[in-house]
Image: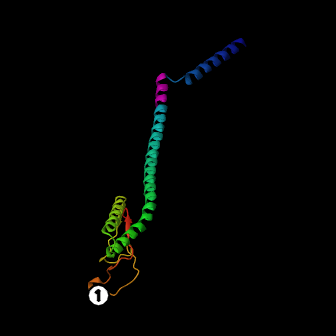
Amino acid sequence: KEEAKGEKREDKKEGKKEDKQEKQPETSEQQLNKEIDELKKAQAEEKDRYLRLAAEFDNYSRRTATERLELIETASESVIKSMLPIADDFERAIAVLKDSKDSDASKQGTELIYKKMMEMLKNSGVTVIEAIGKDLNTDEHEAIAQIPAKDPKQKGKIVEIAQQGYKLNGK
């Protein structure tokens, strides 16, 4: 029995040795290669994350810059729109003053203020829509009356302006 037990013990020891040989720890080279692969994978993930963040930041910067420009344009647009009727009033005042017997100083003063105002509007992106003698363009002009043309060349042309039209930044 003792011999049988001894043989069993030896068999168990040999089985354990075989298991140990099969489950031998990886060599240092294999471990290093495994670590390198894991680090490469982690690096690729971090690089992808970095690129996505950089692209997102670029998009954010462009979007905020565009929004800032639009805000500036719309803020100035309301001020400019409120000044256009005043420019029209100046034009009417100048037309009345030309026929008036008032002093030349008041005429010149009014014209000077009008020119300064128009220069300021021009610098802000406002342009006058030229219309007299041009074909009616319904995108830019609004017809309020039709007058029979004395000259056939004047047919379909604008002959008088009731209220001046303006464009702001080409719109």
Identify the residue at image location x=63%, y=17%: 13
* Residue 161 at x, y percent in the picture: 36, 76
Whether the magenta-drawn stretch holds residue 62 is answered as: no
Whether residue 164 is visible to the viewer of this picture, yes or no, is: no
In the depicted structure, whether residue 159 falls above or below residue 1? below
Identify the residue at image location x=27%, y=86%: 152
Query: Which secondary structure type mostly characterizes the magenta part of the structure?
Result: helix
Examine the image and state in which quarter residue 83 appears: bottom left
* Residue 40 at x, y percent in the picture: 45, 33
Start-end of magenta stretch: 28-36
* 109 left or right, relative to 58: left
Examine the image and state in which quarter residue 116 appears: bottom left
Identify the residue at image location x=49%, y=25%: 31
Identify the residue at image location x=44%, y=48%: 59
Q: Nearer the viewer, residue 86 or 168?
A: 86
In the depicted structure, whether residue 53 falls above or below residue 35? below
Single out the residue that lies furthest toward the top: 2
Amino acid type of the residue tagged 1 in the rendering: Lys
* Residue 52 at x, y percent in the picture: 46, 43
* Residue 92 at x, y percent in the picture: 37, 72
Q: Which residue is mark 1?
A: 150
* 25 left or right, relative to 44: right
Image quarter where the C terminus lies is bottom left
Whether the magenta-drawn stretch holds residue 35 is answered as: yes
Task: Specify few, some or many for label 1: CA neighbours under 10 Å numbering under 14, 14-19, or 20 or more.
Answer: few
Q: Total marks drawn?
A: 1
Image quarter where the N terminus lies is top right
